[in-house]
Image: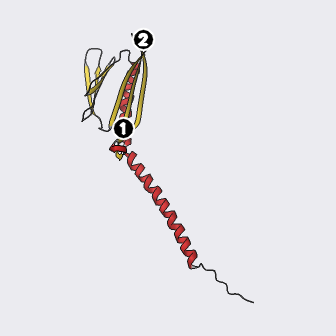
Amino acid sequence: MKTNSKFAFSLVELVIVIAIFSFLITIIAQVTAVYQRAKNEWMFLSSDSLEAKEIGIRIEDELISSYYVNIVQTQERDEIHLDKTTFVLYKSKPKQLHETLRFIRGETKTRVRKISDMIYWKIDSVPLFNSYMVYEIAFYVYNRRSVNYQNKLSRKLVYYIVVHKFRR
């Protein structure tokens, strides 16, 4: 006896399959949206972070090789006086870095560089014992696109310097 069997889905089975696919597509869309938002929030950090790291590395190199260190902090600027170089970081907009190099013959050369307004730094000098100083400089970059609690911008630590020096 010959049976004529045709395999077909019922209407209920098709509705269930469509519901499962729509649920999976919704999950994928949400994950993609979260990823895109995170990418947009931190994408700008690449240029500002590189700029902050470059400044931090420059200051750290000079700070490590220098015997004389004097840090002066005022409301409008932070000054780092070293053996051969003076760094002046202006806090008010437009933010600037003035780097003054002193040569053996008494000549000086000053380079002025505009810094992104999203770069923030914090400088501390902590005396330990009588003859020991710890200098800490932290560079942060604010995130322009993310707004957190109470409309404050979030910040990311991009470079941290700790240098120990003996006082004379």
The picture places residue 153, in percent across and down from the top left corner, at: 34, 42
- Element class at badge 2: loop
Q: Seen in the image, is 97 located left or right of residue 41? A: left
* Direction bottom: furthest residue: 1
Residue 154 image point, x, y percent:
37, 41
* Label 2 CA crowd tier, 10 Å (few <14, some 14–19, many 20+): few
Left or right: 153, with 11 as reference point: left
Colouring rule applied to residues: secondary structure
Q: Residue at x 49, y 60 (%)?
A: 27
How crowded pointer 1 is (Cα within 10 Å; few <14, some 14-19, many 20+) is rated as many
Image check: 22 left or right of 98? Answer: right
Give the quadrant of residue 104.
top left
**3D distance between C-alphas at marks 1 and 2:** 34 Å
The N terminus: image quadrant:
bottom right
Name the residue nearer the viewer: 163 or 101: 163
Element type where label 1 sits in the image? strand
Q: Which mark is residue 131?
A: 2
- Identify the image quadrant of residue 33: bottom left
- Across and down, in percent, residue 14 comes to 55, 75
Inspect the image, locate mark 2, and give the three-letter code of the amino acid beneath it: Ser
Q: Which mark is residue 141?
A: 1
Residue drawn at point x = 35 percent, y = 29 percent: 122
37 to 64, vertically: above or below = below
Q: Looking at the image, which residue sits at the far right?
A: 1
Residues 108 and 28: in front is: 28
Badge 1 vs badge 2, beta-carbon distance below 8 Å: no
Relative to the observer, which residue lies in front, 23 or 54? 23
Taking the spot 47% from the left edge, 56% from the top edge, the residue there is: 31
Look at label 1 and name its amino acid.
Val
Q: Is residue 49 above or below residue 78?
A: below
* Earlier sequence position, callout 1 versus callout 2: 2
Q: Position of residue 141 (x, y in %)?
A: 36, 38
